[in-house]
Image: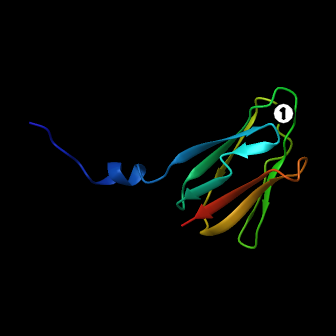
Amino acid sequence: MALLAFGPAQASLSSVVRIVLQKSRRYDPTDLFLHRGDTITLVNGDENAVHHAFIEADQFSFDAGDEEPGKQATLTLKEPGDFVIQCGIHPKMKLTLHVQ
């Protein structure tokens, strides 16, 4: 007989970790729909390029600093809204986050 528990274990499943690749002067994916509490891990997948991800918003700011090849940065989203992650080195690199 199987016993199912829907208490605290279900609450821990509510947040999600999404991997975003930074490669060839672009983010992959370029649009993400997320919930508050979700985490994004930005991974520099380029062999030679440095990236510098940041967000400037009224609700909060985020600055990953220079990310050398193979490095990663993490951001947990606590505020609802639409936000754009940009690259300070490659201005055309943009990732739009839609957080509910």
Please state if 11 lies on the left or on the right of 100 as rendered.
left
Q: Give the vertical position of 31 relative to 51 (above or below).
A: below
The image shows residue 51 at horizontal and vertical percentages of 84, 42
The single residue placed furthest to the top in the displayed view is 47
The image shows residue 89 at horizontal and vertical percentages of 91, 47
Please state if 25 lies on the left or on the right of 20 as rendered.
right
Question: What colour scheme does the image use?
Answer: rainbow
The image shows residue 64 at horizontal and vertical percentages of 79, 48
The image shows residue 18 at horizontal and vertical percentages of 58, 45
Residue pointed to by mark 1: 68
Q: Residue at x 56, y 58 (%)?
A: 33
Q: Quadrant of the N terminus?
A: top left
Please state if 70 lies on the left or on the right of 18 as rendered.
right
Q: Amino acid at mark 1?
A: Glu
Judging depth in this view, the residue of 8 and 28 nearest the camera is 28
Please state if 30 lies on the left or on the right of 5 as rendered.
right
Q: Dot 1 lies on which element? A: loop
Q: Residue at x 80, y 55 (%)?
A: 86
The single residue placed furthest to the left in the displayed view is 1
Judging depth in this view, the residue of 44 and 74 nearest the camera is 44
Where, by quadrant of the figure, is residue 76 drawn? Answer: bottom right
Q: Residue at x 28, y 54 (%)?
A: 7
